[in-house]
Image (cartoon, helix red, strand yellow):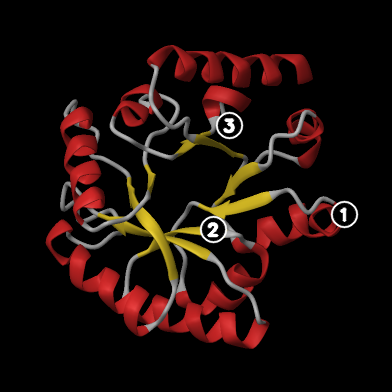
């Protein structure tokens, strides 16, 4: 089992090497619902980026190991409610789902109270889908200004979950261009099924779950 997980990660790394992209993206192993025992082989070979989508699960799973392994970076890749923001700021290094001013306000307040800085991605809703979180593309500039200038949050870039309508490459291209136009250096884009397309369009953080860990129960 452990070798299988490592082998899958190495295949993804090899595929990225074959793309000849200028900067190799970081691979976030999306570990939500998987026990720590399944992740230990990856941790033991030095993999440090892991993604979770629930604050309570993250606290239960990672709190102890984070005390002894300072290299680990845990990413919040799911929707974050503002009432969970303080706990999230406490345990996560990156939050990928900043999508409204109330959440930005609470995250800033929590950073001050906890004396901790977190890195953020602004989630954009590239397909204007009612069932998905994220701000409309046309509001990204003003929301970025609010978060970065007024709230002084460390916003690295945009994050996107594209619609499932066979136009993934077009969405990635549009978000990549917007990210560049906004002067942002990082981009959270691409999952198990489309990470190579995302890397081609300058994604710097790939969120890969089943491609490394297999299907969820």
Q: CA distance from mark 3 to mark 1?
A: 28 Å
Residue positioned 16% across, 42% down in the render: 174
Residue linked to disc 1: 68
Residue linked to disc 3: 216
Residue positioned 57% across, 80% down in the render: 111
Q: CA distance from mark 2 to mark 3?
A: 23 Å
Q: Secondary structure at mark 1?
A: helix
Q: Earlier in the sequence, mark 2 or mark 1?
A: 1
Answer few, some or many: residues within 10 Å of disc 1's Cα (few below 14, many 20 plus, some between 14 and 19).
few
**Residue 13 lies in what quarter of the image?**
top right
Q: Earlier in the sequence, mark 3 or mark 1?
A: 1
Tag nearer the camera, 2 or 3: 2
Answer few, some or many: residues within 10 Å of disc 3's Cα (few below 14, many 20 plus, some between 14 and 19).
few
Q: Residue furthest front?
A: 22
Question: Residue 130 location in percent, x, y?
Answer: 20, 56
Question: Residue 175 location in percent, x, y?
Answer: 22, 45
Q: CA distance from mark 2 to mark 1?
A: 19 Å
């Amino acid at each position: 089992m452990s070798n299988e997980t490592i082998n899958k990660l190495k295949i993804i790394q090899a595929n990225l090497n074959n793309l000849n992209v200028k900067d190799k993206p970081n691979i976030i192993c999306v570990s939500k619902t998987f026990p720590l025992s399944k992740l230990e082989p990856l941790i033991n070979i030095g993999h440090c980026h892991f993604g979770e989508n629930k604050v309570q699960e993250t606290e239960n799973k990672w709190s102890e190991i984070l005390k002894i392994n300072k290299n680990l970076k845990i990413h919040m890749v799911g929707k974050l409610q503002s009432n969970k923001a303080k706990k999230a700021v406490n345990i996560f290094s990156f939050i990928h789902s900043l999508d409204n001013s109330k959440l930005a306000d609470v995250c800033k307040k929590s950073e001050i109270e906890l004396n901790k800085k977190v890195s953020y991605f602004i989630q954009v809703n590239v397909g204007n889908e009612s069932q998905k979180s994220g701000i409309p593309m046309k509001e990204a500039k003003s929301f970025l200004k609010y978060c970065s200038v007024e709230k002084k949050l460390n916003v690295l870039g945009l994050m996107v979950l594209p619609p499932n309508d066979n136009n993934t490459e077009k969405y990635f291209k549009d978000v990549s261009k917007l990210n560049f136009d906004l002067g942002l250096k990082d981009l959270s884009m691409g999952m198990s099924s489309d990470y190579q397309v995302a890397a081609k369009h300058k994604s710097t953080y790939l969120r890969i779950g089943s491609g490394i860990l297999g299907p969820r129960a």
